[in-house]
Amino acid sequence: MSSVKTFHIRGEFKKRKDKIPFGKYVRALNVEDALEVVYSIVGSKHRVKRNMIYINAKDIKEITNPENIKDIIVKTFATEDDLALPKRK
């Protein structure tokens, strides 16, 4: 049985003539699932098609130490067993 891992994925997307960088922390079983989540989040939030989102393989990192996670929601899911989600600022 697989365990859920935390990934930090960096990339950029093209909107009009600008290239906008982004970084996302996501929890997934493997790299392919993590990429799918990032494509979904960025596409939904910024109305960008998948072919306008650019992610290099070297910009995908698995986070093993939960203290390195900067997104408080993802960090809570990675560390807590009894979840009471904090509010994002």
Image: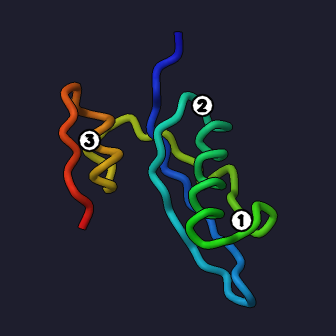
> What is the three-letter code of the residue carrying label 1?
Ile
Left or right of 28 on screen, residue 33: right
The percent position of residue 69, horizontal first and vertical second, equals: 33, 49
Residue furthest out toward the right:
51
Q: Secondary structure at mark 1?
A: strand
Task: Count neighbours of disc 3 (C-alpha within 10 A) and say few if under 14, some if 14 to 19, many if 20 or more.
Answer: some
**Residue extending furthest toward the bottom:** 17
Residue 52's image quarter?
bottom right
- Of helix, strand and loop, which one carries label 2? loop
Query: Of the residues under marks 2 and 1, which one precedes in the sequence?
Result: 2
Find out whether the residues at labels 2 and 3 contact each other: C-beta distance under 8 Å.
Answer: no
Colour treatment of the image: rainbow
**Callout 3: helix, strand or loop?**
helix
To which residue does mark 3 refer? 76
Q: Closer to the camera, 65 or 6?
A: 6
**Place of residue 17 in the rendered image (x, y in percent of width and height, measured from the top left):** 74, 90
**Cα–Cα gap, marks 2 and 1:** 19 Å
Which residue is the site of mark 2? 30
Spot occupied by residue 72 in the image (x, y as percentages of width and height): 27, 52
Residue 54 is left or right of residue 80, and the answer is right
Name the residue at 49% across, 43% down.
7
Dot 1: few (<14), some (14–19), or many (≥20) neighbours within 10 Å? Answer: many
- Answer above or below: position of 54 versus 57: below
Give the spatial CA distance, label 3 vs label 1.
Answer: 27 Å
Task: Name the residue that disc number 1 marks.
Answer: 53
Q: In the shown orientation, is residue 31 left or right of residue 26?
A: right
Q: Quadrant of residue 54?
A: bottom right
Badge 3 amino acid:
Thr
